[in-house]
Amino acid sequence: MRYSMTPEQTRQSRRAVLQAAVDTAAACATFTPDAFFREDGEQQITWQARRAEAIRVCIGCPVRAACEELALRDGDGRANVDDMVRGGLTGPELAAVRTRQADRLAAAIDADRDAEGQRLDDLTAELKRTVLKNPDKAGGHRGSRAQAEQNTQVQLLTDQIRVIRKARRTRAGWKAAA
Ligand code: SF4
């Protein structure tokens, strides 16, 4: 499946849309993440060859624009450190784009956080509703199956909430739960 977004659509899309596109159609899905990162102490000549191959994969990737936008919003890439490829760009190239588009990215990241906060609220409300359901009403075997399904659903929601909270805390620089 080809997932193409115009550059303008990509710029305006919120994080969840970008991530869904990448999750669905990333050309690197079958590669190990190491293929896109320089190893500690790896010689420049070896990395150059691997880097060129990673960029080649990215150039043929149907979601490259979305991936680049996520990388920019994630703050990937450092100006003087040539150690990664994401969205078809090296770390220094990502850093340069981020500098050029600093104002736009700041607004996009704010919007991401708003959407994420809304998602967190929705998940928390759903968790409360799920916990308050009474599976005993189903009775007998159906009751125990309903209880098991409820437990699974609670676990799923709890895990999703934990992932979002952890990401928010990491961005805020909090190492421990607050
Ligand atoms: S652009 Fe490159 S790093 Fe991004 S999803 Fe595609 S292949 Fe992977």
Image: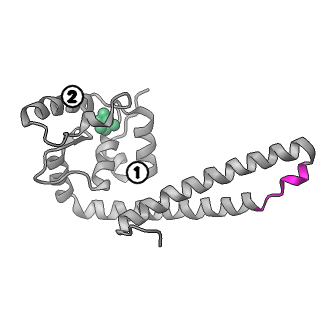
With 136 as the anchor, is 116 left or right in this view? left
Pick the residue in front: 97 or 171. Answer: 171
The percent position of residue 2, horizontal first and vertical second, equals 40, 28
The residue segment tinted magenta is 132-138
Neighbour class for label 2 at 10 Å: few (<14), some, many (≥20)? few
Residue assigned mark 1: 13
Instruction: Inspect the image, locate mark 2, and give the three-letter code of the amino acid beneath it.
Output: Arg
Q: Residue at x 33, y 32 (%)?
A: 32
Q: CA distance from mark 2 to mark 1?
A: 25 Å
With 72 as the anchor, is 79 left or right in this view? left
Q: Residue at x 22, y 62 (%)?
A: 102
Q: Is residue 164 above or below residue 82?
A: below
Q: What SS does tag 1 mark?
A: loop
Pick the residue in front: 123 or 62. Answer: 123
The percent position of residue 59, horizontal first and vertical second, equals 24, 31
Pick the residue in front: 3 or 148. Answer: 148
Q: Which mark is residue 56?
A: 2
Dot 2 or dot 1: first in sequence order is 1
Q: Which mark is residue 69?
A: none
Q: Quadrant of the N terminus?
A: top left
The response on whether ligand 1 sits within 8 Å of label 1 is: no
Pick the residue in front: 73 or 13. Answer: 73
Instruction: Inspect the image, locate mark 1, and give the three-letter code of the amino acid beneath it.
Output: Ser
